[in-house]
Image (tube, grey):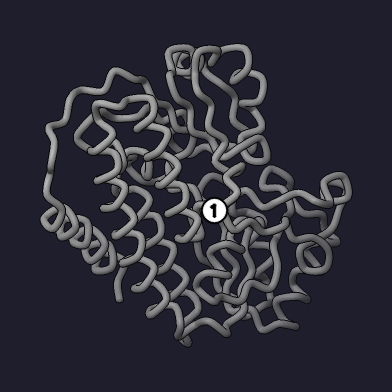
């Protein structure tokens, strides 16, 4: 199934849910300013706020939360915010200080603190390259929680509850929208599991270890990562080890990401049969809005299928 077809199915599921659910109360304009940090989280928040208001997206364009620097416009958005949704300090490290010093009036919601999430420890050692970073953070949790559709549903519920508390006149709308978004997530998850089942046993490598929630949910088999930190290039020794890993595991693909240079992948892939693909865990190439999360997931599913299928 092509990416465009899968995206159409996911969008049609949203329209169907909207038809099936009846609006019981009128919607009033929200009196709150809402900020969300990254595209996938912003998308889920936008879905819950649909028809009421639009949240502000902090990280735009082709950037990474691992190395982002706050702009003056970002500071103003935080200063005006009533609610800020972020994953947490493990991901958006640049926000720790500004949330305390600038977003003084905001209810800051660290989504990763939700006890209902299924959290996974950051992988280390072996093909995941143990280094000083991992030694210092040996018990760190993987922050890429949104890539598990079940976690995405937990996030939607938490967002709905926070918005309903802060903006009670629109509480019914937030809860209704949350049910619609969750129905879309369920439809996307079912379609993805069916499609990806055909490549579940095919090994691959990723640029950095951002995908284990996706792998666990959809039954995929990653064999390692190029680097433990996306802003750090692998050493010459590591490049040699990665080539050996590709040959040893029979990895069919090595995936890079749009916000980072793929120059090192060209070197790694020399004299190996592996192919190159591009995954996007942050939706950095997509237009922000309620559809972005679903477009991002559909894109990644299709890229994986295209790269891992037998030539």
Establish if 90 lies above or below 208: above
Q: Position of residue 150 (x, y in %)?
A: 47, 60
Image quadrant assignment for residue 196: bottom left
Left or right for 297, reference 215 = left
Q: Split into 4 quadrants, where in the image is the N terminus?
A: bottom left
Residue 143 at x, y = what percent?
62, 48
87 relative position to 250: left or right: left
Q: Residue at x 43, y 27 (%)?
A: 35
Q: Nearer the viewer, residue 216 or 20?
A: 20
Up-down relation of residue 24 to residue 189 (above or below): above
The residue at the point 82 percent across, 58 percent down is 236
Q: Which percent across, then down, holds residue 46?
A: 32, 38
Is label 1 in a helix, a strand or a loop?
loop
Residue assigned mark 1: 257
Residue at 42% in and 33% down? 162
Q: How many marks?
A: 1
Q: Position of residue 149 (x, y in %)?
A: 45, 60
Q: Residue at x 57, y 35 (%)?
A: 110
236 w.r.t. 93: above or below: below
Toward the viewer: 103 or 300? 103
Nearer to me, 239 or 3: 3
> What crowding class fits label 1: few (fewer than 14 Cα within 10 Å), some (14-19), or many (20 or more)?
some
């Amino acid at each position: 199934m092509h990416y465009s077809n899968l995206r159409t199915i996911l969008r049609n599921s949203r329209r169907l849910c909207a038809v099936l659910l009846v609006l019981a109360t009128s919607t009033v304009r929200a009196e709150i300013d809402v900020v969300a940090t990254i595209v996938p989280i912003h998308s889920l928040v936008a879905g819950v706020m649909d028809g009421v208001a639009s949240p502000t997206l902090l990280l735009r364009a082709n950037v990474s939360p691992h190395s982002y620097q706050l702009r003056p416009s970002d500071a103003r958005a935080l200063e005006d915010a009533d609610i800020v949704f972020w994953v947490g300090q493990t991901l958006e490290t640049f926000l720790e200080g500004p949330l305390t010093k600038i977003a003084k009036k905001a209810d800051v919601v660290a989504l990763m603190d939700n006890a209902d999430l299924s959290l996974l420890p950051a992988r280390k050692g072996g093909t995941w390259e143990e280094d000083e970073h991992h030694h210092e953070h040996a018990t760190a949790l993987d922050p890429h929680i949104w890539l598990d559709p079940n976690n995405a549903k937990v996030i939607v519920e938490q967002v709905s509850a926070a918005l309903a508390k802060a903006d009670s006149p629109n509480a019914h709308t937030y809860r209704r929208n949350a049910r619609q978004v969750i129905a879309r997530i369920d439809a996307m998850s079912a379609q993805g599991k069916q499609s990806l089942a055909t490549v579940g046993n095919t090994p691959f490598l990723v640029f950095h270890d951002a995908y284990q929630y996706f792998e666990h949910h959809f039954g995929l088999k990653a064999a390692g990562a190029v680097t433990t930190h996306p802003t750090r290039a692998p050493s010459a020794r590591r490049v040699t080890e990665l080539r050996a890993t590709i040959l040893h595991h029979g990895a069919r693909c090595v995936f890079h990401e749009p916000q980072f240079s793929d120059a090192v992948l060209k070197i790694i892939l020399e004299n190996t049969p592996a192919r190159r693909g591009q995954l996007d865990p942050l939706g950095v190439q997509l237009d922000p809005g309620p559809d972005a999360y679903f477009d991002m997931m559909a894109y990644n599913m299709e890229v994986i299928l295209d790269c891992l299928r037998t030539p």
